[in-house]
Amino acid sequence: MDAEKQRPDRSWRPDASAVVSAVSCTVWALVCHLLPAGGKGGMFLPHRDRKQIVKLPAPAGIATLLGYVATIPAANLAVTHFGAVPVGFGYAAPAGVYMVGLALVLRDLAREAAGRKAVLGAIAVGTVVSYFLASPGLAVASAAAFAVAETMDFVIYEPLRSRGLVIAMLASNAIGLLADSLLFLKLAFGSFAYLPGQILGKAWMTLAAVAVLTILRRRKRATA
């Protein structure tokens, strides 16, 4: 694969507000996820302990779903303006890798905040948005990778919910980020040259989110 084909397409430039929207919705989603569900412990309890204790407040679901969909134009914006970026240990990956990693995290949070049907709808919307916002040469690869990775994340996450949010998130994101990386690189470039960087960049986002959620859970328990 020659260097020209590996170079990201810069012909389309989305509005810079996409990144602001993704970040602000993510922050608001995390804040809302701190709120207890009906004052009885919130989403940090294992699913079997929460049982049917009402869903989280509506703002949490709305903010998380908006943040989830907003990661798509944000990822395109990052690739368009920054190309490949270092992700650590001497590896590089297309700049959108961080937003894709964030999408996997937000999908799991959206499942808890908004429910299964809302998340499946968001995956469908995200697939369409991913297709139309990607450059022509990457449209199919972008949409296919998003649809497959997010669906696999969903399938893995569901049976693990009973073991708690963190365990389910780590396991499902590991599968999702690998599927997204393999499929996108194969369809878009026919090469796995960026594979280590893709996996590493998405893993950083998952680990960062898990770390934040763990800290918030501990603080919540300490003040309970």
Image (cartoon, rainbow, N blue to C red):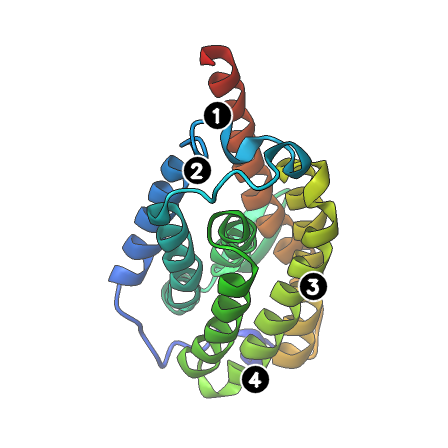
Q: Between marks 1 and 2, how big is the CA–CA gap? A: 10 Å
The residue located at (51%, 86%) in the rendering is 137
Q: Which residue is mark 4?
A: 140
Quadrant hosting residue 52: top right
Examine the rendered structure and indicate whether residue 34 appears above or below residue 200. above
> Helix, strand, or loop for circle 2?
loop
Say whether marks 4 and 2 touch (CB < 8 Å). Answer: no
Characterize the local packing of mark 1: few (<14), some (14-19) or many (20 or more) Cα atoms within 10 angstroms.
some
Q: Between marks 1 and 4, how big is the CA–CA gap? A: 38 Å
Amino acid type at circle 4 is: Val
The residue located at (66%, 58%) in the rendering is 153
Amino acid type at circle 3 is: Met
Say whether marks 1 and 2 touch (CB < 8 Å). Answer: yes
Q: Which residue is mark 1?
A: 216
Instruction: Name the N-terminal-most of marks 1 and 4.
Output: 4
Q: Which mark is residue 33?
A: 2
Instruction: Name the N-terminal-most of marks 3 and 1.
Output: 3
> Helix, strand, or loop for circle 4?
helix
Q: Which mark is residue 152?
A: 3
> Helix, strand, or loop for circle 1?
helix
Examine the rendered structure and indicate whether residue 84 appears above or below residue 59. below
Instruction: In this rendered view, identify the residue nearer to me: 150 or 62.
Output: 62
> Helix, strand, or loop for circle 3?
helix
Say whether marks 4 and 3 touch (CB < 8 Å). Answer: no
Instruction: Name the N-terminal-most of marks 1 and 2.
Output: 2
Q: Position of residue 173 (x, y in %)?
A: 65, 51
Instruction: Name the N-terminal-most of marks 4 and 3.
Output: 4
Amino acid type at circle 1 is: Leu
The residue located at (60%, 73%) in the rendering is 147
Examine the rendered structure and indicate whether residue 123 appears above or below residue 85. below
Q: Between marks 4 and 2, how big is the CA–CA gap? A: 34 Å
Instruction: In this rendered view, identify the residue nearer to me: 114 or 185.
Output: 114
